[in-house]
Amino acid sequence: MATPVVESATSPNLTDDLDAVVQRDDLRTRTEELNRLKAVIRDGPGVEATAAQRAKGKLTVRERLDLLFDPGSFVEIEAFRKHRASAFGLANKRPYTDGVVAGWGQVDGQKVFAYAHDFRIFGGALGEAHAAKIHKVMDMAIAAGAPLVSLCDGAGARIQEGVTALAGYGGIFRRNAFASGVIPQISVMLGPCAGGAAYSPALTDFVFMVRDVAQMFITGPDVVEAVTGEQITMNGLGGADVHGGVSGVSTFTYDDEEACIADVRYLLSLLPANNRALPPFVPTDDPSDRRTEALLDLVPATSHAAYDMHRVIEEVVDDGEFLELHADWARNLVTALARIGGRLVGIVANQPLVSAGTLDIDASDKGARFVQMCDAFNIPLVTLVDVPGFLPGREQEHAGIIRHGAKLLYAYCNATVPRIQLILRKAYGGAWIVMDSRSIGTDLSLAWPTNEVAVMGAEGAANVIFRRDIASSDDPEAKRVEMVQQYKDELMHPYYAAERGLVDDIIDPAATRDTLARALEMLEGKRAASATRKHGNPPV
């Protein structure tokens, strides 16, 4: 976590004492001096430090804040804050802001708090005063019930301040945990984030990363090489593509800061301010009763044929627009935010194009995290089911598919927001239960006439139930085909689950959008009781 102080070029005006200002007895003169000093603080530590920042392909801290907030709305706090350390030459290096800019402003008219590291000052390294500013703005966000955005561009703790600096991270982590599920927390990675500092983004709801400039890791490449002998680059170890597609740490990845921060603003426009508020309702010109005829040709009737679930989602949601989370990680499960009839929903959907839509360890973790986020912030859940089961194999079993699958099960069972399940085709075995079935509490279970709800696929079931009949037959293959069809006819026809009350209705696929919009309107006032307890003990 710890990193040395980076000596940046600092304007002499930036470190001037305010004694000269205090000595003046003319209020107008003092105000002019105040405004001059604030302008110097806003300009930052100097031309050379700014040039070095731009040479890395990065924006300055003020430019980032200008992109995030509505013009002229940002209000800064503690701009005059300086550190109190004196060891190792720090007594003569006491720039204003101490390397972090904090405050609040408006994003599309919504109140949002933020703090942003300034890499030009001490390399964005965290010291006592730096941490105190972050703690303060986090406390303000929690008290105000407003989202918190952190623009991260700092390499770790300030070594010269010792454990005092290190303890500052503990205060950040504690507040991250306290605010979890209370206000939306968004981490935007715009530079290095090493050591224990990486745990703060991991504790937040959403992580944005920019390729080439942002990296996150607990131990850097030098330590990795010293301990294991492996040589690896910073991006290869913890770059945006690694965390976006391999580890799952990053929710969104981008090629540049402008596009990244634009989507931070878009995400904030979707979310409620806190856990006591409802997501904004946005009227749409896309009729909620619009027929979705394209779905009749998009999804093959045969359960083995693949199709792109993204296209199904596009047909159903308002104007075909949705924001996919973790798009490059665990791609066999799609998680997305969208609106249906103006109402925000969280969509969880199996993706037949990837691993036939099976649930595996990463997909279970991805889905569980998303369901919990939606439940925390009053976002109704729509689950689109086309799942052949959990991915079999020694690797999955040894890596703990049981406990990982249980995470998704626990998240759904614990959710109290409106929940709608729609079965498109396959819904086999335990995966059908886990994908928000009636048996675990979904409010409404719908299905298309292509649905197959069963313990397993007909081929596998027939091989188990009729194995002796098949083996003793004069023509085993013909007998197997006969038994497979018999099993389908008796236990897997489209109305089997509906006849037993496990599906509420079988709908015309072309009426999917209309049906979901009506269901969401009906469930809008849902109130669900929760168990009296300190907290649950979910699988990990």
Image: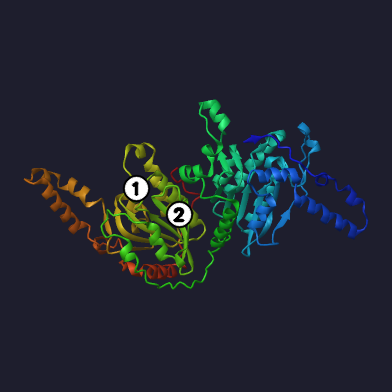
Q: Label 2: how many residues lie within 10 Å, few (<14), some (14-19) or many (20+)?
A: many
Question: Does 404 appear above or below 70?
Answer: above
Picture layout, residue 444 above or below residue 409:
below
x, y (%) of residue 317? 43, 65
Q: Is residue 183 visible?
A: no
Q: Is residue 536 visible?
A: yes
Separation (CA) of disc 2 from disc 1: 21 Å
Residue 237 located left or right of residue 192? left
Query: CB under 8 Å between callouts 2 and 1?
Result: no
Residue displayed at 73% across by 37% down: 7
- Viewed as shown, does residue 223 lie left or right of 352? right
User: Foreground: 367 or 191?
Assistant: 191
What's under tag 1, amino acid-wise?
Ser
Could you say which is closer to the camera, residue 21 or residue 49? 49
> What residue is disc 1 on?
355
Q: Which quadrant is home to the N terminus?
A: top right
Q: Which of marks 2 and 1 is in front?
A: 1
- Which disc is residue 371 wearing? 2
Classify mark 1: residues with Cα within 10 Å, few (<14), some (14-19) or many (20+).
Answer: some
Q: Locate residue 99, reporting x and y percent.
A: 71, 45
| Image position of 283 with respect to 182: above or below | below
Does dot 1 land on a helix, a strand or a loop? helix
Left or right of 539 on screen, residue 257 = right
In the picture, residue 216 is in which quadrant? top right
